Image (cartoon, rainbow, N blue to C red):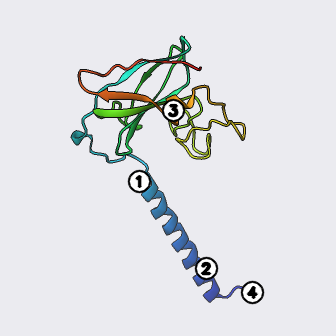
C-alpha cells in the first residue's frame, strides 16, 4: 500500500514541472544576458594607445597600466615581457577615450579578464595590494606611480604613445 495519495502525486508533479520551467527560463535569461554586452561604441571616440614601461631601466613585465579619466572611467592594459602595453576600454573594445588621464602602473593590481580570473586576486578586483598579504604579489612599483600617481597623460589623435621610465628609488 502506497503512502503517497494521488492528490500528493499531482501536487508533486506540478511542483516538479514548475521547477523545470523556472530552470529553463533562468537558463535562457543567462544565455541572453551573458552574451553581447549591447554597448553602443558608435558614440565613443577611441584612440589606440600604447607604449613601454621600464623600472630602473629594465622592461617591466606583467604590470597593469591604467589611464584614469576624471569621471572615473578608465582604460587598461598589461605589459608584456618587453614592457610594451596596449590599452583597451573593456573586454570588447581596444583603445582609450581622448583627454587628460592619471596613469597608474602596478604589478599587484588585478583586473578581471586581464590578469585575474573570477574569485582570484586582491580583495577587490582592480584594487592594488601593496602589502602583499594573503599570498598576494608584492607591489614592485612605488606609490608615486600607482596609488598616489604623479603620472599624467593627455590622450589625443596626435599623442597616443606614452612611455614611462619609472625609478624604484
- Quadrant hosting residue 60: top right
Position of residue 160 measured from the top left corner of the image (x, y, whole percent): 31, 22
**How far is disc 1 from disc 4 in space, using C-alphas?**
44 Å
Label ID, residue 3: 4
- Work out whether mark 4 precedes mark 3 in sequence or the reverse, and give the earlier one: 4
- Work out whether mark 1 precedes mark 4 in sequence or the reverse, and give the earlier one: 4
SS for callout 1: helix
Q: Residues within 10 Å of mark 4 (few under 14, many from 20)?
A: few
Q: Report which residue position mark 1 lands on.
A: 33
- Work out whether mark 1 precedes mark 2 in sequence or the reverse, and give the earlier one: 2
Position of residue 96 measured from the top left corner of the image (x, y, whole percent): 33, 32
Q: Report which residue position mark 3 lands on.
A: 146
Q: Is residue 44 left or right of residue 79?
A: left
**How far is disc 4 from disc 2 in space, using C-alphas?**
14 Å
- Work out whether mark 3 precedes mark 1 in sequence or the reverse, and give the earlier one: 1
Q: Report which residue position mark 2 lands on.
A: 12
Amino acid at each position: 500500500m502506497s503512502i503517497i495519495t494521488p492528490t500528493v502525486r499531482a501536487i508533486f508533479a506540478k511542483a516538479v514541472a514548475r521547477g523545470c520551467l523556472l530552470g529553463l527560463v533562468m537558463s535562457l535569461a543567462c544565455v541572453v544576458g551573458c552574451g553581447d554586452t549591447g554597448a553602443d561604441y558608435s558614440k565613443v571616440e577611441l584612440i589606440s594607445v600604447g607604449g613601454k614601461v621600464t623600472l630602473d631601466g629594465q622592461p617591466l613585465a606583467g604590470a597593469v597600466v591604467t589611464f584614469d579619466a576624471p569621471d572615473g572611467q578608465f582604460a587598461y592594459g598589461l605589459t608584456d615581457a618587453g614592457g610594451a602595453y596596449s590599452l583597451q576600454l573593456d573586454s570588447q573594445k581596444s583603445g582609450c577615450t581622448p583627454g587628460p588621464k592619471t596613469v597608474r602602473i602596478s604589478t599587484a593590481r588585478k583586473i578581471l579578464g586581464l590578469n585575474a580570473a573570477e574569485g582570484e586576486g586582491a580583495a577587490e578586483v582592480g584594487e592594488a595590494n601593496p602589502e602583499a598579504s594573503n599570498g598576494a604579489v608584492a607591489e614592485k612599483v612605488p606609490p608615486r606611480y600607482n596609488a598616489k600617481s604623479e603620472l599624467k597623460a593627455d590622450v589625443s589623435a596626435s599623442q597616443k604613445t606614452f612611455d614611462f621610465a619609472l625609478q624604484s628609488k
